[in-house]
Amino acid sequence: MSPITKLALAVVAIVCALAGAFLVAPDGKSVSLIFEMLSLAPLAMSLGMNIRDASLKATLALPNAASTTVAQAAGFDLEVTAAADLVAAFEILLTAPALTTVQLPNAATMTYNLIASASANLSTPTIIQQNLLVQTGAGGVGAALALARARIPVNLGALGFRYVGLQIVSGSTATNSSAVSATLEMLF
């Protein structure tokens, strides 16, 4: 959400709060109620998007060999068209699993990309956020669980895309990591 949109929402919330305070409590206590409501405005603006919807969560097994690319079989439908911008306020949360030294030896990489397509099965995908997350094996311990958040470009529909999903690319020295999965979720 852009800073101007956030500011506009804050102004609307404050005006509604002020009007509500005077309509609900026209006595002498309304002034303190107004200040209490105003003090909550910065808190509301700083909260991140953390509401989850179980139907908007996908898991994807990591590649089973070196130099292999895997992608979701079905993308999230953003329901945007070429005539409309994406105006929904949400984020994408990627959770990459912890990987052992067998799965991700030193200097080996696992790269996570956010892709978009006009088709629900994500055929002919276009990478819209390359290297959203890159795990690199190091120190003889593999790689730790990692998280990454992203926002979707608002002009996705105008570019001819309606669906988004996850693509994972294993590096040339990575091994079979298909026993673990990455998760992609939409947060509101």
Image (cartoon, rainbow, N blue to C red):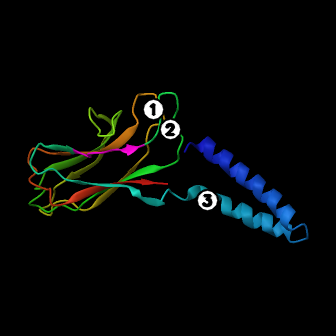
Dot 3, crowdedness within 10 Å: few (<14), some or many (≥20)?
A: few
Q: Disc 1 residue type?
A: Gly
Residue that carries the numbered disc 2 in the rendered image: 86
Residue 188 image position (x, y, % from top left): 50, 54
Q: Which mark is residue 157?
A: 1
| Callout 2 crowding tier (Cα within 10 Å): few <14, some 14–19, many ≥20 | some
From the viewer's perspective, tell me whether residue 104 is left or right of residue 188. left
Residue 118 lies in what quarter of the image? top left
Pointers 1 and 2 in contact (C-beta within 8 Å): yes
Q: Position of residue 33 (x, y in %)?
A: 79, 68
Q: Is residue 160 left or right of residue 121?
A: right
Q: Secondary structure at mark 1?
A: loop
Of the residues shown, which amino acid type is indicated by label 2? Leu
C-alpha separation, residue under disc 1 versus residue under disc 2: 7 Å
Q: Is residue 161 above or below residue 94?
A: above
Q: CA distance from mark 3 to mark 2?
A: 22 Å
Residue at 52% x, 34% y: name it: 85
The magenta segment is 71-77
Q: Nearer the viewer, mark 3 or mark 2?
A: 2
> What kind of residue is marked 3?
Ala
Numbered disc 2: secondary structure: loop
Q: Nearer the viewer, mark 1 or mark 3?
A: 1
Q: Quadrant of the N terminus?
A: top right
Tell me the residue at 72%/49% (across/down).
Answer: 11
Occupied quadrant, residue 70: top left
Q: Residue at x 41, y 28 (%)?
A: 159
Q: Which one is nearer the viewer's eye here, 88 or 133?
A: 88
Q: Return the mark for residue 44.
A: 3
Question: Circle 3 — which element?
Answer: helix
